[in-house]
Image (cartoon, helix red, strand yellow):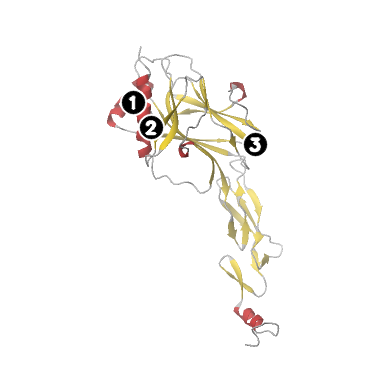
Amino acid sequence: MVSTSIPCLWITFCLHLCCYVNTGIAQNTKEVILLDSKAQQTELEWISSPPSGWEEISGLDENYTPIRTYQVCQVMEPNQNNWLRTNWIEKGDAQRIFVELKFTLRDCNSLPGVVGTCKETFNLYYQETESEVGRNIRESQYVKIDTIAADESFTQGDLGERKMKLNTEVRIIGPLSRRGFYLAFQDVGACIALVSVKVYYKKCWSIIENLATFPDTVTGSEFSSLVEVEGMCVSDAEEEADNSPKMHCSAEGEWLVPIGKCICKAGFHQKGDACERKYSELIMILFSPRSKYSTL
């Protein structure tokens, strides 16, 4: 019988190592973050069922700042069913949610004595609710998103050579209709370290185009959807006749397909994204009989 403590210690080591390799990734400005486990330094306090399954541990990021992660390595016994559930995530206006997982996974062939019991995948689920539902996990109420497999898994040799193979997987859920949701991770007998979980949605940020202002707009519920948005003319501009300004917000948070435009009102001309009064018009106003400057 081989103790499972060796694989668990191996995962903990990888968590400290992987954070130094995974550096310099810029935040996508089209993303609105709902959950980022790596950004939370205090305990996450997610629900583990049974309690002897997933374990919350500490790691270090690239700035030696503590981060909270989860691991499980119940590879010796068959028929594992270990669940981990996040806290409730309020979705706001989002309909289409992105889930980014970063994790390490041990190669079963590198663990002696686990033939037939060790797995190299885990399952991702979600449950929509209008509010928090307590701490009990009712498996039948969760919808499966996907089975998650590692592109690369670790071996004992990788550990000795200090190699790091951090896997990143992104899944999409939606359309969502309730106020919030839970994510859940089901382990069926793998040796996994869940390094970080990031949940976000995308929006098109406000922009001025063709002298019209388009507000922040949440993307649609489908990958191919385009959300049509009416623009509002900037100050001292008006809609071109029968050609009101419109743009379309894509599922990736990009403004596309501009239609129509605004034009500067009489006596004004365009300068950048604004309309300013023409010089000749300004002179006439300054020296008109009603102007206080006309007597200078």
Q: Circle 2: is it few (<14), some (14-19), or many (20+) Cα within 10 Å? A: many
SS class of the residue under badge 3? loop
Query: In the picture, which quadrant includes the C terminus?
Result: bottom right
Q: Residue 76 carries which label?
A: none
Residue at 59%, 67% in the rendered image: 274
Q: Circle 1: is it few (<14), some (14-19), or many (20+) Cα within 10 Å? A: some
Residue at 58%, 33% in the rendered image: 88
Of mark 2 and mark 1, the one earlier in the sequence is: 2
Q: Looking at the image, is mark 3 or mark 1 nearer the viewer?
A: 3
Residue picked out by circle 2: 15
Residue 266 appears at what percent x and percent y?
Answer: 67, 73
Residue 159 appears at what percent x and percent y?
Answer: 31, 28
Residue 150 in sight from this viewpoint = no
Q: Circle 3: is it few (<14), some (14-19), or many (20+) Cα within 10 Å? A: some
SS class of the residue under badge 1? loop
Q: Judge from the rendering whether residue 118 lies leftward or rightward of residue 274; answer left or right.
A: left
Amino acid under disc 2 = Leu
Question: Distance between the Cα atoms at labels 3 and 2?
Answer: 33 Å
Amino acid under disc 1 = Thr
Q: Looking at the image, is mark 2 or mark 1 nearer the viewer?
A: 2
37 and 113: which is toward the camera: 37
Compared with 228, 81 (above or below) is above
Q: In which quarter of the image is residue 175?
A: top right
Question: Distance between the Cα atoms at labels 2 and 1?
Answer: 15 Å
Amino acid under disc 3 = Arg
Residue picked out by circle 1: 155
Residue 56 appears at what percent x and percent y?
Answer: 45, 28
Residue 218 appears at what percent x and percent y?
Answer: 61, 46
Residue picked out by circle 3: 179
Residue 241 in sight from this viewpoint = yes
